[in-house]
Amino acid sequence: MIVIFRFLAAAILSIGMVAGLAAAQDVPASKVLAEPNVVMEADPPPPFTYWAPENSTIRNHPRMEGVWTAEIEGQPARYYYGDQCRASEFQGFVGQPLDALPEKPENAVWRIACSSCAMTSDLGRARMNVFYEDSSQTITKISCG
């Protein structure tokens, strides 16, 4: 009886490991985030750094809690408004055609605009902005704001 139990336990464990391996291989590219080399001066740090340029310095915004900036001398600062809109889950679509995006999840707020198009400057941290290059329809940036 103990031998059968051990055999069944080993079989179940093996199946679980194979299923876990298959699940890991099926993770879409949108789950893999860039981790640029940055200097972290922010406290608390942002949840992700994929948005920051290589060799930039990340700091907390001086007046807005939950907002970070990435700065490189001589360049405009990049702002990061957190991940309330779940933009981190969609970064794998940057560089892909606009029609590669999945359907918008229920209750999500998305704004899709070409990178050179006029749009309102209102800030919505729960809104995901998807920017694309007008002529090629290629996604250039996905961010909250």
Image (cartoon, grey):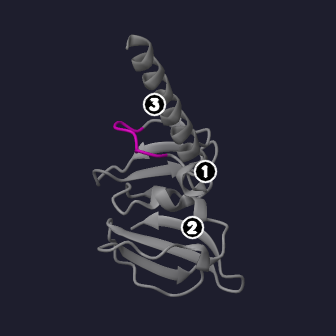
Q: Residues within 10 Å of mark 3 (few under 14, many from 20)?
A: few
Q: Which mark is residue 53?
A: 1
Alpha carbon separation for disc pair 3 and 1: 45 Å
Identified at 50% across, 87% down, the residue is: 118
* Element type where label 3 sits in the image: helix
Identified at 61% across, 72% down, the residue is: 139
Residue 122 x, y percent position in the rendering? 34, 77
Q: Considering depth in this image, is 141 or 86 the residue closer to the camera?
A: 86
Q: Is residue 30 above or below residue 103?
A: above
Question: Which amino acid, by three-letter code, is at mark 2?
Answer: Lys
The residue that label 2 is drawn on is: 141
Q: Considering depth in this image, is 130 or 60 the residue closer to the camera?
A: 130
Residue 6 x, y percent position in the rendering? 44, 17
* Element type where label 1 sits in the image: loop
Closer to the N terminus: mark 1 or mark 2?
A: 1
- Total tally of numbered discs in the picture: 3
Residue 124 x, y percent position in the rendering? 32, 71
Magenta span: 42-48
The residue that label 3 is drawn on is: 12
Alpha carbon separation for disc pair 1 and 2: 13 Å
* 50 left or right, relative to 127: right
Which image quadrant for residue 47? top left
Q: Residues within 10 Å of mark 2 (few under 14, many from 20)?
A: some
